[in-house]
Amino acid sequence: MTPNDLVLTPLGLRFQGRRYPCTIGHGGISTRKHEGDGATPSGHHRIVGMLYRPDRMTRPADWARPIRPGDLWSDDPTHEAYNLMVRAPYPHSHEALRRADPLYDLVIVTDWNWPYPVRGRGSCIFIHQWRRPGYPTAGCVALDPRHLRTIAARLTFGARLIVRGR
């Protein structure tokens, strides 16, 4: 473990000597994650990407990629593009990355079940903005938008999100 890793603790997300309040999946932490369970998977998950809305913020890190209109994330375990970023039109189950609300204005992407996804094991775990303090996610880790931007500006590609099973 290094100071550049993000460590989920019962008191929040620890990063570079600070703790940030966060929320996790409504299914709690799981060692047996599967699609639709709402759980945040335990383990060491590498940070493999950062996406942001260029119409709503400046580039948070030099390795961040813009979210374009039509960018989607496939969450259909029956499709070959499961757990991959895809483009509209995409007739299978997916999440829109470019949303009307600010939830995905800044998204840190982990390698959970990626790049070679096991069908049904659960789609990507993101670190993104929370809806409000204490409101659970569908399995991701969510933060106050100011804290998320602070972390994104200091985060290095390949750092890890460490989630210990409970």
Image: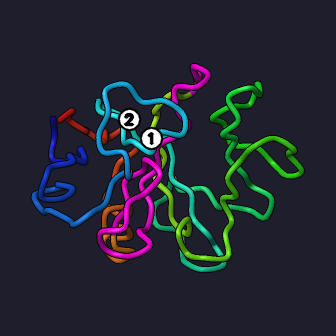
Q: Is residue 105 left or right of residue 33?
A: right
Question: Which amino acid type is shown beneath numbered disc 1?
Answer: Thr
Asked if the stretch drawn in magenta spans residue 48, the answer is no
At label 2, counting other C-alpha atoms closer than 10 Å, the crowd grade (few under 14, some 14-19, many 20 or more) is some
Is the N terminus in the top left, top right, bottom left or bottom right quadrant? Answer: top left
Residue 37 rendering spot, x and y as whole percentages: 47, 39
What predominant SS class does the magenta segment belong to? loop
Residue occupying the point 49% across, 30% down: 34
Which tag, 2 or 1, sits closer to the chain's start? 2
Q: Is residue 104 left or right of residue 10?
A: right
Q: Magenta residues, as a range?
A: 115-143
For label 1, the residue is 110
At label 1, counting other C-alpha atoms closer than 10 Å, the crowd grade (few under 14, some 14-19, many 20 or more) is many
Residue 65 rendering spot, x and y as whole percentages: 60, 56
Residue 116 rendering spot, x and y as whole percentages: 59, 20
Asked if the stretch drawn in magenta spans residue 141, the answer is yes
Residue occupying the point 34% across, 77% down: 146
Is the C terminus in the top left, top right, bottom left or bottom right quadrant? Answer: top left
- Give the CA distance from mark 2 to mark 1: 5 Å
In this view, 133 is above or below 76: below
Question: Which amino acid type is shown beneath numbered disc 2?
Answer: Arg
Question: Mark 1: which secondary structure?
Answer: strand
For label 2, the residue is 46
Determine contact: label 2, label 1, CB under 8 Å.
Answer: yes
Residue occupying the point 63% across, 35% down: 83
- The quarter of the picture where residue 71 lies is bottom right
Residue 68 rendering spot, x and y as whole percentages: 74, 62
Along the line of sight, the residue nearer the viewer: 46 or 155: 46
